[in-house]
Amino acid sequence: MILSDIRHYLEARGQATLADIALHFDAAPDAVRGMLEVWIRKGRVHRQMATASCGSSCHQCDPAATEIYLWGPGVDATQVTEKTENPSYCTHVAFARPINSTGERPMRDYGNIPKIDWQDDKPTQVRIKAQLLHEEPLVLRFPAEFELDFDAQACGCEGGSDMLLDCQPQAVFAALAKTNNLPALVEIGEQAREAGQVVDVDRSGQRLIIHD
């Protein structure tokens, strides 16, 4: 279990209790909570305590089953709720629905993200890895002859053919390394994955946007 695993799990579900996440990854709740704290600091995950429908005096639930984590920029102020269907935990836990419950995505602005022009040399690779080491976003620009063709579905991408969103970095960089005969890209993809980041691919702009 790494940061990106938790990201993909929460993105798919929208929200989950700490107990559900720990059960899915067969991990201790405290270990999962520590990794979730990283995403909370990045502003990508929000934590809420469920309100039991039986009243504030209810003490029947495992605390991990009432600690809810939501993926996204925030929670709808109307606090629309629904009951959990998992009988292993409390059956009266109320969930808050994420703002992005419609599945719509806002337009992304990459204007303020640092940019590096790709060159197959050590100094460029060091700059890229330093940016990823600090889990900072990065726009990586490639020359016109660089091939950005790969199997988008196999790399977990969303979006259209010219603009792919939230791709798995390890898969993308490994594919591009093979296509362009640039083995140095493999290590960059692995580092981005370890940092819990994803990749947007702007084919018309000849660039990769690495972000959390």
Image (cartoon, rainbow, N blue to C red):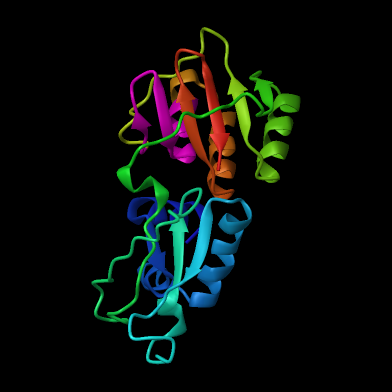
Residue beneath the point at 65% across and 29% down:
113
Position of 43 with respect to 91 (left or right) is right
Residue 187 percent across, percent down from the top left: 58, 38
Q: Report the span colored magenta.
A: 156-177
Position of 91 with respect to 140 (left or right) is left
Question: Residue at the right extreme?
Answer: 123
- Residue sitting nearer the eye, 155 or 202: 202
Q: Against 35, is 8 above or below?
A: above
Position of 81 with respect to 119 (left or right) is left
Number of numbered discs visible in the structure rendering: 0
Asked whether 74 falls inside the magenta stretch, the response is no
Residue 26 percent across, percent down from the top left: 40, 72
Asked whether 174 falls inside the magenta stretch, the response is yes
Residue 61 percent across, percent down from the top left: 39, 87
Residue 72 percent across, percent down from the top left: 47, 49
Question: Residue at the top extreme?
Answer: 144
Residue beneath the point at 53% across and 45% down:
193
Q: Against 92, is 106 above or below?
A: above
- Residue sitting nearer the eye, 45 or 144: 45
Q: Is residue 173 visible?
A: no
Q: Against 147, is 91 above or below?
A: below
Residue beneath the point at 40% across and 27% down:
164
* Position of the C terminus by quadrant: top right
- Residue sitting nearer the eye, 185 or 212: 212
Q: Is residue 175 visible?
A: yes
